[in-house]
Image (tube, rainbow, N blue to C red):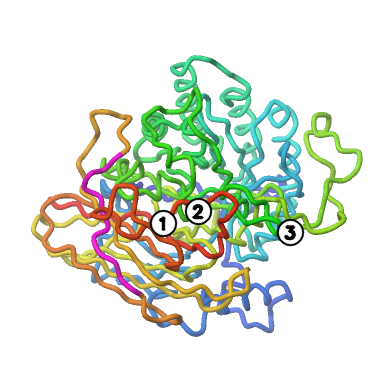
Amino acid sequence: MGHGHHHPHDHQHDHSHGTPSAEGPLPPALDVDVPDSELSPSQLSRRSMLRRAGLLGAGLAGAGVLGGTTPAAALPNATNGPQGSDARTRGGGHGGSGNGFLWLAGDHHIHTQYSSDGKYRVIDQVRQGARHGLDWMVITDHGSATHARIGVDKVNPDIKDARAAHRDQLVFQGLEWNIPGAEHATVFVHPGRDEVEVLKRFETDYDGSLHPSPSPSVNEALAVSGLRFLAEQVRRRKVDDALMLANHPARQGIDSPHEIRDWRDATSAAHPIAVGMEGAPGHQAAGLPSPKGPGGVRGLYGNGPGANSFPGYPAESYRTWGGFDWMTATVGGLWDSLLAEGKPWWITANSDSHQVYAEPSVRGQDDDFAGHGKHADPVYGSGLDLTQNDYWPGHYSRTHVGAARFSYAAVMDGMRAGRIWVDHGGLISGLDARLKGGGRWATLGGALHVKRGTDVELSIEIALANGPNWAQFVPTLARVDVIRGQVTGPVADRDTFTAPTAKVATSFEVGKSTGTVRLTYRLGRIAEPQYVRLRGTDGKRTAVGLRGAAVDPAGPAGDVRGDADPWQDLWFYSNPIWVLPA
């Protein structure tokens, strides 16, 4: 279920208030019509990095994966969700697949000195995100009494300064919501003159840390009310848009299946606020073996069932699998149970960056978070800190969003529509997946509407890694899996977290290490609604999936405490594409 609303109110904002234009020209580093000689040193450096990674210009420009035109005349009915909105692909082709979109890499979970456990300035995180190839970022400091009282206001000028200093980046203001009775979530809004007011009211009235209750029903109702509050602010044009994504959903087992469904269904199906979850959490350096690493648990998933955990979740749900959350990594598990209902629920990946592994800074003197709402600016410390769990934004985890143009609204539209694929460690450079049949096609997050009995096929183009990642090696894609499931409709029990029909339908061994891989999978003549999604791996750590070899013969292996080098276990995942016969 997508939506066809492309923000006609995506107007030019008043720059006197420090708010960027909602839509502007393509950043010079991304615009191949701007010659290298006209770029600043930093812009030229970024363009060079994109070229080395195979994300821009020469080498793959004609391959169809990067910057190909949309075959709209021959295949006019690409839609953005299982109930078939009318949004079309259009635009450019940076940073991922073709389809006529700009594929913009980003991170929606980033902390600064305005979080009680953070350290860096906003400009530090934005500068590092830009350096590591990100196009958009969301600043998400922890919800708390101090943050609601001071931090939401005080961080905003820093965000505006970062927007002005890095005009090639889209920098959203958000916060990490303590969902009443549940885990955390990213909440963020489209920039505008009321962004602080809306976020402040939301946190003050709906944050679980400010309104604790022993009653599950009270907590669940408050969470739904918070999402409806955000939807009302969009309806009233206080902000142009707002989104929520559940963070590290299986970490403590307190995001029950029915709560996730309630968040998803809390607001208008045409313009939902809660649209997905972290398919892979941050803190990916946490499992690096000591003494050269923290020696902990990848993703900081070291918990077990607690008093408030959903009792149905198995012991395996409390750890990561190939760096991905159990809800996403289990074929036929909770994510597939949501997709089998025919309703959208998307996955992302991000850094959750607080304090960075092997980075030497420490908090400055005269630190008083409670009094100032922020920590003192970081200063140089005495050596590299190998005990920290995080990477800089973009260093390891990336969320790629298909946007119709380079703007805040287009990124939010692309996320809501599910035009998203995620990767770790730069495993691949680009992904183009399309379901085709009856003279039509649909891409990630979309739905292909065909007559019953139409022959449908999935075409896949993957731009392999075309240069070293930030660990200074060129990753190699070993295998691509096509996961297929039936759409069976709404569940009778909203605590369902299995999808019996979902399984790995086929796997492709990748026999090359450079260039572009083209794959085709025939679904056959379609009689019933269904979906497909993709997963790929470097093949270094695999295991039979949790629902058995008949479902997933070579899925991600469970991450081992103190021995989980994330660079030796790389995966990518795509969001689904539906096919709906009539």
Left or right of residue 452: residue 107: right
Range of magenta residues:
498-509
Say which mark, if any, is on residue 556: 1
| SS category of the residue bearing label 2 | loop
In this orientation, does residue 578 appear? no
Inspect the image, locate mark 1, and give the three-letter code of the amino acid beneath it.
Pro
- The residue at 45%/32% (across/down) is 255
| Residue position marked by numbered label 2 in the rendering | 323
Q: Circles 1 and 2: CB distance less than 8 Å?
A: yes
- Identify whether 406 is placed above or below 490: below
Q: Position of residue 507 (x, y in %)?
A: 29, 66
Q: Position of residue 243 (x, y in %)?
A: 50, 41
Measure the C-alpha gap from mark 3 to mark 1: 27 Å
State yes or no: residue 499 in magenta.
yes
First in sequence, mark 1 or 2: give its number: 2
Left or right of residue 88: residue 353: right
| Residue position marked by numbered label 3 in the rendering | 358
- Identify whether 47 is placed above or below 556: below
| SS category of the residue bearing label 1 | strand
Measure the C-alpha gap from mark 1 to mark 2: 8 Å
First in sequence, mark 3 or 1: give its number: 3
First in sequence, mark 2 or 3: give its number: 2
Quadrant occupied by the N terminus = top left
Say which mark, if any, is on residue 47: none
